[in-house]
């Protein structure tokens, strides 16, 4: 305990410094400051092309925050207590589970882990602020710091717009400010949160200097929101003003009430005419209004494909092109999100995700309302009021856009989660209005947790121990054959397989055969996601090397232990055998159906030919039939033959576009395969 008490102040200092640096990097991303210190967060929410790529800041930033969080888990001993924020924390934890489940449930292919790291930034921000937020002075300084950062960004937005620098040009409208970001839709939710906090601090701050500082930040935020010319933002400001007047009119002076009414009228009336060319919500070229209707229609069609658990994070953009309608195409370029917070959650996490989101938002508002009915210090009251107003604004904007929980909205998502993280520290000091569960663990609960942990450990041993035994025995056989030259030296049969036949098998079974070292981890991950979503074994994700290890050493029985042994042995095989030799061993041990267990026999059984005599269409059939080899000739329907050909040829065109022309692929697809028994 003495060691922990010494580490605690240092840990608070390190965590606070990390949070301050991260918030500055997010809020001022793209500014001269971020360029001077070489910080660029765009790789977090700008998808990279090609296979997995890792932005250095992303890797080190996530690692640093995870290490800090782990240190808190080890050091901190918070007393179990009845808490007003219990259901609110349950809601945030539910959102956390949704994002953590994405690597196991996403339908995206390929799946890039670095593209899914941005939720960790905002979620870790919440938990770290929550851990530090038990001190009222710390909470006040953190809010002032966030308001300051937003005020700086608002200054950039206004000045850039006046100078005509870094503007976003909307078709049929003109320039809109985006600050140092890459889109006005990234800017306005940041201004909503910063403006709400600035107003609340201005309203309850007794110090004149700070009062004027927050008023200046508020005015800059409102001006920046106006210059984005975004209807959803203007409606959100109007709704925040209306809620403020309805709930706190007795505490607002006449002068402030007149100012709030003026702001509300300007923003609400402005939504009727902005970007409409003078029409009253009737401009047929208004992409912002009419395009959204088509986006929602497309998003709902995507949601209907997996209505329970959704498609995964950032899946709308992936699936949009498959469900796009001609009406939506005319409003191109297409957006990358569903333009509705709740519909976007429905696409990504299904009905379960929407329920968790609504639960979380409801309990944020409920907790804020409960706290505002109690006596609070002026600093804490300002935090709660600002959070309440900004959450209202986010919900209203979320009806027409995706202001948070979206990679392009990382700055606003971080500000929101950081502000939410301050609420438990305020709520835990107030007597609870209703009984809530106690966070302490009884002996029975601890026993259950230990039993579950032991069960998971035993389950892992049940898989790993047999896998290691199989691997050890298979490795010994492999090494003996390598030393004797039985598998290392190519046989004559390999020379009789022409290159286009090899290319077809590689494209069909393992497109990245020459890139990986025995195991394609992305393919294994894809197979895991497919099998979990279907609650059945649908894909194996095996490479050619893994399949060869299974055929020659591990055995063809499908068990989890043998799968692990396959992976280990495939890595070992790549150390001792060339790619060409592994491919030859594979072709001489694969099962093609109808009793054929090698490429030479398969060519004779199906076509009465040698491998070098195969046409491109015939070779495509043999490559495509491997995943579903027939047991009898009656299973070879014309539809199945065509499906096998099309699958192999499509992948050949994808993985070897420079070797085979589109004309060759088209001719092979039209080729009618004639089996030897049909002649």
Image (cartoon, grey):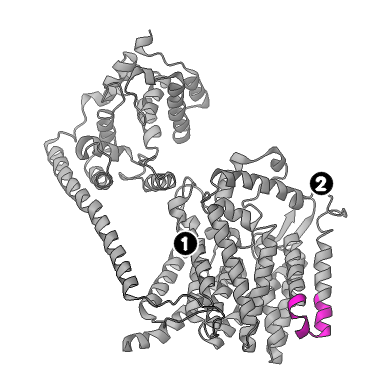
What numbered label is drawn on residue 549?
none
Which of the 4 quarters of the picture holds residue 417?
bottom right
Is residue 47 found left or right of 6 in the rendered image?
Answer: right
Q: Nearer the viewer, residue 144 or 374?
A: 374
Q: Secondary structure at mark 1?
A: helix
Q: Secondary structure at mark 2?
A: loop
Q: Determine if the magenta segment contains residue 258.
A: yes
Q: Which residue is mark 1?
A: 97
Asked if residue 33 is positioned above or below residue 409 in the image, the reply reads below
Asked if residue 91 is positioned above or below residue 589 in the image, the reply reads below
Q: Position of residue 361 (x, y in %)?
A: 60, 67
Q: Nearer the viewer, mark 1 or mark 2?
A: 1
Q: Residue at x 73, y 86 (%)?
A: 212
In the picture, which quadrant includes the N terminus? Answer: bottom left
Q: Residue at x 47, y 45 (%)?
A: 109
Magenta residues span 246-260
Is residue 538 found left or right of 305 in the rendered image?
Answer: left
Q: Which residue is mark 2?
A: 284
- Residue lying farthest bottom? 207
Q: Residue at x 24, y 58 (%)?
A: 458
Q: Residue at x 46, y 51 (%)?
A: 105
Q: Position of residue 415 (x, y in %)?
A: 59, 71
Q: Position of residue 590 (x, y in %)?
A: 28, 29
Asked if residue 45 is positioned above or below residue 372 in the image, the reply reads above
* Mark 2 crowdedness (10 Å alpha carbons): few <14, some 14-19, many ≥20: few
Q: State which tag comes first along the sequence, 1 or 2.
A: 1
- Using the numbered discs, state the Cα–Cα distance from disc 1 to disc 2 in whole angstroms: 42 Å
Asked if residue 506 is positioned above or below residue 359 in the image, the reply reads above
């Amino acid at each position: 305990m003495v060691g922990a008490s010494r580490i605690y102040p240092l840990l608070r200092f390190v965590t606070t410094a990390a949070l301050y640096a991260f918030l500055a990097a997010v809020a001022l991303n793209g500014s001269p400051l971020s360029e001077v210190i070489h910080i660029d967060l765009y790789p977090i929410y700008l998808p990279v092309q090609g296979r997995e790529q890792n932005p250095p800041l992303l890797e080190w930033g996530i690692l640093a925050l995870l290490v800090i969080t782990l240190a808190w888990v080890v050091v901190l001993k918070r007393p179990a207590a009845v808490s007003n924020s219990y259901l609110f924390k349950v809601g945030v934890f539910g959102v956390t589970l949704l994002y953590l489940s994405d690597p196991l449930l996403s339908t995206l292919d390929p799946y890039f882990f670095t593209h899914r790291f941005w939720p960790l930034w905002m979620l870790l921000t919440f938990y770290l602020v929550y851990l530090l937020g038990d001190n009222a002075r710390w909470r006040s300084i953190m809010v002032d710091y966030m308001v300051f950062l937003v005020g700086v960004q608002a200054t950039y937005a206004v000045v850039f717009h006046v100078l005509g620098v870094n503007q976003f040009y909307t078709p049929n409208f003109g320039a809109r400010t985006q600050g140092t970001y890459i889109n006005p839709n990234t800017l306005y939710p940041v201004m909503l949160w910063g403006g709400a906090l600035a107003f609340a601090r201005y309203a309850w701050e007794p110090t004149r200097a700070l009062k004027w500082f927050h008023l200046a930040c508020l005015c800059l935020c409102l001006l920046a929101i106006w210059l984005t010319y975004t209807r959803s933002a203007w409606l959100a400001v109007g709704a925040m003003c209306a809620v403020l007047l309805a709930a706190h009119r007795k505490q607002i002076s006449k002068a402030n009430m007149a100012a709030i009414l003026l702001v509300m009228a300007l923003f609400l009336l402005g939504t009727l005419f902005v970007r409409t060319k003078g029409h009253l919500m009737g401009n047929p070229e208004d992409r912002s209004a009419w395009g959204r209707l088509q986006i929602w229609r497309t998003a709902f069609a995507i949601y209907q494909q997996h209505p329970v658990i959704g498609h995964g994070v950032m899946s709308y953009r992936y699936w949009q092109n498959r469900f796009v309608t001609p009406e939506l195409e005319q409003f191109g370029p297409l957006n990358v999100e569903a333009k509705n917070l709740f519909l976007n959650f429905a696409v990504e996490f299904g009905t379960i995700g929407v329920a968790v989101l609504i639960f979380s938002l409801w309990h944020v508002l409920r907790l804020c309302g409960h706290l505002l009915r109690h006596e609070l210090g002026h600093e804490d009251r300002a935090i709660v009021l600002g959070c309440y107003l900004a959450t209202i604004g986010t919900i209203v904007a979320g009806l027409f856009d995706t202001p948070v929980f979206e990679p392009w909205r990382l700055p606003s998502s971080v500000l929101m989660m950081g502000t939410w993280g301050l609420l438990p520290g305020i709520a835990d000091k107030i007597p609870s209005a209703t009984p809530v569960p106690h966070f302490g663990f009884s002996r029975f609960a601890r026993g259950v947790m230990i039993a579950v942990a032991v069960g998971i450990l035993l389950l892992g041993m049940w898989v790993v121990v047999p896998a290691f035994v199989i691997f050890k025995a298979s490795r010994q056989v492999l090494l003996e054959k390598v030393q004797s030259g039985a598998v290392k030296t190519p046989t004559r049969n390999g020379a009789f397989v022409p290159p286009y036949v090899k290319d077809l098998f590689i494209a069909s079974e393992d497109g990245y055969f020459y890139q990986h070292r025995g195991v394609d981890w992305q393919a294994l991950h894809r197979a895991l996601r497919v099998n979990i979503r279907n609650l059945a074994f649908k894909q194996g994700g095996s490479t050619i090397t893994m399949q060869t290890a299974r055929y020659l050493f591990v055995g063809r029985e499908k068990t989890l232990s043998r799968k692990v042994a396959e992976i280990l042995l495939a890595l070992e095989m790549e150390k001792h055998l060339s790619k060409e030799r592994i491919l030859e061993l594979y072709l001489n041990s694969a099962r093609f159906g109808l009793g054929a267990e090698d490429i030479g026999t398969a060519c004779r059984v199906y076509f009465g030919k040698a491998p070098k005599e195969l046409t491109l269409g015939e070779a495509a059939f043999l490559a495509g039939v491997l995943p579903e080899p027939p047991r009898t000739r009656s299973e070879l329907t014309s539809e199945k033959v065509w499906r096998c050909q099309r699958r192999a040829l499509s992948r050949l065109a994808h993985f070897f576009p420079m070797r085979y022309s589109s004309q060759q692929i088209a001719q092979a697809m039209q080729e009618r395969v004639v089996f030897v028994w049909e002649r």
